Image: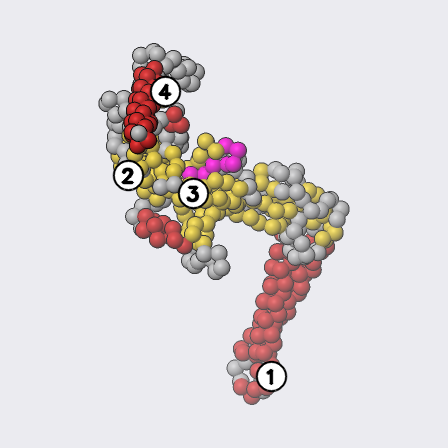
C-alpha cells in the first residue's frame, strides 16, 4: 500500500514538472512574439564638395630663406687730412659716378703744388746749365785742354741734374694728386647713407668712413641650400640658367624673377650648406639691403603633373590619402604620394589620375565605401546647407 502511494507521488511530480516547463516555454514564446523587429537604419549620404584632378606643367623648386645684399658697397674715406669745408649731398640721396660729395680745404695743398712747381723749374734750370757746361767741354778739339776728370765731372753734373728734375716732377705730380683728393666724388652709382661728419670737422687721411654708398639696382639675394640638394642644383645649372623667384615676407604672393649668378666653391663647414646668389632688377627700390626674403630656386619644369587642392589630402597613421567619388556616388579611400606645393594646389605623384573627382570638403563625414552627396559651392564660395535625411540625393 505504501509503495503504491509513492509511485502515485512520483507520477504527480513528473507531470507537474512537465506542465511547469511547458508553461515557461509558452511564456518565452509569447514574450518573443510580443517584441517588435528592429527597423533597418540607413546612414544618409555625406554632403561633400569635390573637384576634378587636373593636369598642369609645374616647376620643381627648392625653397629657402635669404637676405637682400647690395651689389656694390663703397665706404668713402678721406685720402688727405684737412678741414671739411663743404658737403654737397643730403643723407639718403641718389648719386651717380663723379658727383661731388665733400670738399676738404684745398689751400694747403695748393701751396704745396706751387712749391713743387717752383722746385721743378729750378731743377730744370740747373739741368740746362749743366748741359751747356758739358757741351763746352765736349766741343774742345784739343784733348789736352780739358782733363779727363773735368770731363767726367761735367758729365756727372748733367746726370745729377736730370735725376733732380725727375724727382721734382714726381713731387709735383704728388702735390697735384693731393690737391685733387680735396674734392671727394662718388665712385659708383648708388644711394648714400647717413654721413659721419659735418662741415667744419677736421678729418685725417684714411682714418674712418665719411659716408657709405650702396648700389641698389641691380641687387643680390643671398641664400643657402643643403649639401643634399647641391647635386640637383649643379645638374640643372649645367643645362640652363636657373630662374629664382624672390618674395618679401609681407608680399608672399608677388614674386620677382631673377637669375642664379653665383654658386660658392665649398660647403660651409659645420653647417652642411652651400651659399648661392641671385641677381634681380630693383629699379623701383622694392628690395632693400639687409632685409630677409623668401627664395624659390626653380630647378626644372615637370610636365603634365596631377594637381589637386591642398585641402583635399588627409593624413592618417599609414600616410596621406584622399577620397575619390566614384560613378555610383560612393567614396573610395585612396592612399596617395604627394609632391611639392604649387600655390593653393599640391602635386600628387601617385594615387590619383587626371579627371577623377576628389573630395575637398566634408571629409570628416565620409566613410570608405559609403555614399556621398555632392554639393556645389555658392557664389560666396561656401557650400549650401545639407538637406534632410529624407531628401533625395
- Residue at which label 4 appears: 47
Disc 3 and disc 2 in contact, CB within 8 angstroms: no
Question: Does residue 1 sit above or below 260 in this rendering?
Answer: above
Q: Earlier in the sequence, mark 2 or mark 1?
A: 1
Q: Secondary structure at mark 2?
A: strand
**Front-most of residues 229 and 23:** 23
Q: Is residue 228 in view?
A: yes
The label on residue 63 is: 3
User: Residue at horizontal 38%, vertical 13%?
Assistant: 388
Residue 328, magenta (yes or no): no
Question: Does residue 123 sit above or below 358 in this rendering?
Answer: below
User: Residue at horizontal 55%, vertical 80%?
Assistant: 140
Disc 4 and disc 3 in contact, CB within 8 angstroms: no
In the rendered view of the protein, which quadrant contains the C terminus?
A: top left
Q: Position of residue 153 (x, y in %)?
A: 60, 81
Identify the magenta region: 245-251
Residue 249, magenta (yes or no): yes
Q: Nearer the viewer, mark 4 or mark 2?
A: 4
> How much space separates mark 4 and mark 1, taking CA atoms?
122 Å
User: On the picture, is 274 further left or further right than 189?
Assistant: left
Amino acid at each position: 500500500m505504501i509503495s503504491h502511494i509513492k509511485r502515485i507521488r512520483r507520477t504527480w511530480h513528473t507531470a507537474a514538472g512537465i506542465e511547469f516547463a511547458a508553461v515557461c516555454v509558452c511564456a518565452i514564446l509569447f514574450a518573443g512574439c510580443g517584441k517588435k523587429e528592429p527597423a533597418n537604419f540607413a546612414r544618409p549620404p555625406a554632403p561633400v564638395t569635390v573637384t576634378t584632378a587636373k593636369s598642369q606643367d609645374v616647376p620643381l623648386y627648392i625653397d629657402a630663406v635669404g637676405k637682400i645684399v647690395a651689389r656694390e658697397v663703397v665706404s668713402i674715406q678721406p685720402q688727405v687730412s684737412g678741414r671739411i669745408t663743404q658737403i654737397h649731398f643730403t643723407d639718403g640721396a641718389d648719386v651717380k659716378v663723379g658727383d661731388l660729395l665733400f670738399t676738404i680745404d684745398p689751400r694747403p695743398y695748393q701751396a704745396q703744388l706751387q712749391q713743387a712747381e717752383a722746385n721743378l723749374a729750378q731743377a730744370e734750370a740747373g739741368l740746362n746749365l749743366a748741359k751747356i757746361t758739358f757741351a763746352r767741354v765736349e766741343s774742345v778739339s784739343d784733348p789736352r785742354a780739358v782733363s779727363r776728370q773735368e770731363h767726367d765731372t761735367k758729365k756727372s753734373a748733367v746726370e745729377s741734374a736730370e735725376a733732380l728734375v725727375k724727382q721734382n716732377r714726381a713731387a709735383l705730380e704728388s702735390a697735384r694728386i693731393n690737391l685733387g683728393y680735396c674734392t671727394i666724388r662718388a665712385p659708383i652709382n648708388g644711394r648714400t647713407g647717413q654721413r659721419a661728419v659735418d662741415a667744419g670737422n677736421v678729418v685725417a687721411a684714411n682714418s674712418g668712413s665719411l659716408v657709405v654708398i650702396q648700389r641698389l639696382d641691380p641687387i643680390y639675394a643671398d641664400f643657402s641650400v643643403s649639401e643634399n640638394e647641391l647635386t640637383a642644383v649643379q645638374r640643372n645649372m649645367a643645362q640652363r640658367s636657373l630662374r629664382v623667384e624672390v618674395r618679401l615676407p609681407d608680399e608672399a604672393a608677388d614674386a620677382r624673377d631673377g637669375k642664379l649668378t653665383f654658386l660658392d666653391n665649398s660647403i660651409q663647414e659645420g653647417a652642411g650648406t652651400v651659399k648661392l646668389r641671385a641677381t634681380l632688377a630693383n629699379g623701383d627700390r622694392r628690395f632693400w639691403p639687409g632685409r630677409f626674403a623668401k627664395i624659390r630656386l626653380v630647378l626644372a619644369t615637370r610636365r603634365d603633373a596631377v594637381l589637386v587642392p591642398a585641402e583635399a589630402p588627409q593624413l592618417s597613421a599609414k600616410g596621406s590619402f584622399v577620397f575619390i567619388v566614384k560613378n555610383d556616388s560612393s567614396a573610395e579611400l585612396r592612399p596617395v604620394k604627394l609632391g611639392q606645393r604649387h600655390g593653393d594646389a599640391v602635386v600628387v605623384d601617385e594615387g590619383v589620375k587626371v579627371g577623377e573627382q576628389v573630395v575637398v570638403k566634408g571629409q570628416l563625414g565620409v566613410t570608405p565605401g559609403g555614399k556621398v552627396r555632392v554639393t556645389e559651392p555658392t557664389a560666396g564660395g561656401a557650400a549650401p546647407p545639407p538637406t534632410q535625411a529624407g531628401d533625395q540625393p
